[in-house]
Image: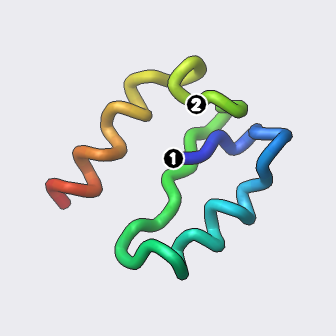
Amino acid sequence: MWGEEDRSRPIAYAERSVTEVPHGPPVRIPGAGRIPMENDAPAVARAPARFFLG
């Protein structure tokens, strides 16, 4: 999961992780910064469920 507004680590880092973690595309959290769960905890909580449950 990646905050789209994270200023310390660009979203490009997350996109690169797709090559390192197969079947694990980055989940963008709109409007979130460095700590996405502080900005949108429900979206962060839903992301693993979508990954594991399909």
Q: Is residue 32 shown above or below 25?
A: above
- Residue drawn at x 15%, y 55% is 53
Residue 3 placement, left or right of 48: right
**In the image, is residue 49 above or below residue 12?**
above
> Which residue is depicted at the point 58% across and 30% down?
36
Residue topped by disc 1 = 1
- Is residue 45 rendered to the left or right of residue 14? left
Asked which secondary structure carries label 1, the reply is loop
- Give the residue type that dot 1 points to: Met
* Total number of numbered discs in the rendering: 2
Q: Quadrant of residue 23?
A: bottom left
The residue under the point 38% across, 25% down is: 42
Residue located farthest toward the left when viewing the structure as drawn: 53
Tag of residue 36: 2
Instruction: Indicate the position of residue 6 as horizontal and vertical percent values.
Output: 76, 39
Measuring from the top left, give residue 17's x and y in whole percent: 57, 69
Is residue 24 placed above or below 28 in the rendered structure?
A: below
Inspect the image, locate mark 2, and give the three-letter code of the amino acid beneath it: Pro
For the residues bearing labels 1 and 2, Cβ distance under 8 angstroms: yes
Measured from the top left, where is residue 1 in percent x and y? 51, 47
Whether residue 33 is situated above or below residue 49 in the rendered picture: above
Task: Give the quarter of the figure containing the C terminus.
Answer: bottom left
